[in-house]
Amino acid sequence: MPERRKFSRVVYRTPATIQQGEQSWQSKVLDLSLKGALLATPLDWVEGNNKDYDISFRLHDSDIELAMELKLIQECGEYLRFQLDHIDIDSASHLKRLVELNVGNDDLLHRELAQLTDLKDTV
């Protein structure tokens, strides 16, 4: 099966908090891209909806916290797939750097950033 993914994913495992309104769940980031995230389904998870979720987590060995708004696009048993909807500039810079360090290919990273910009222009 050909790969349809346009954005490189990097494996990054760290505890995370998922919030929506008054509800909050403890989870774990499994991988990240410039366009979304894969998280472990929390034990007390109830079926999701199409409203924004706030996801936050800290970078390893640092006080840096990334925060982003994501839309739940798929629930697959143990996994929740989210698409990035909004991210503040500081979190975006840290996410870009994290992907940059793990992809190891500047040309690929710049191509993905250009695709991300193109997607925003069409919305």
Image: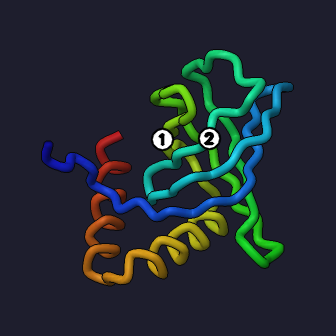
How packed mark 1 is, by other alpha carbons closer than 10 Å (few <14, some 14-19, many 20 or more), is some
Q: Could you say where residue 77 lies in the image, as x and y percent from the top left?
A: 53, 26
Query: What amino acid type is highlighted by mark number 1?
Result: Gln
> Is residue 9 positioned above or below 24 on the image?
below
Look at the numbered disc 1 and give the secondary structure of its residue: strand
What residue is drawn where x is 54% and y is 35%?
79
Colouring of the image: rainbow
If you read the primary sequence from the N terminus, does the residue marked by circle 1 or circle 2 appear first? Answer: 2
Q: Which mark is residue 8?
A: none
Left or right of residue 46, residue 105 in this image? left
Q: Which part of the image, by quadrant, shows the N terminus? A: top left
**Residue under numbered circle 1:** 83
Mark 1 vs 2: CB contact within 8 A: no
Left or right of residue 110, residue 84 in this image? right
Viewer-side residue, 20 vs 1: 1
Q: Could you say where residue 114 lies in the image, as x and y percent from the top left?
A: 29, 66
What residue is drawn where x is 52% and y is 42%?
85
Left or right of residue 29, residue 113 in this image? left
Look at the numbered disc 2 and give the secondary structure of its residue: strand
What residue is drawn where x is 52% and y is 48%?
37
Q: Could you say where residue 76 lies in the image, as x and y percent from the top left?
A: 48, 28
Q: Which part of the image, by quadrant, shows the C terminus? A: top left
Query: What amino acid type is highlighted by mark number 2?
Result: Ala
For discs 1 and 2, the disc positioned in front in the rendered view: 2
**Residue under numbered circle 2:** 40
Q: Could you say where residue 31 lies in the image, as x and y percent from the top left?
A: 52, 55
> Is residue 29 positioned above or below 63 on the image?
above
What residue is drawn where x is 49% and y is 37%?
81
Report the Cα–Cα distance between label 1 and label 2: 15 Å
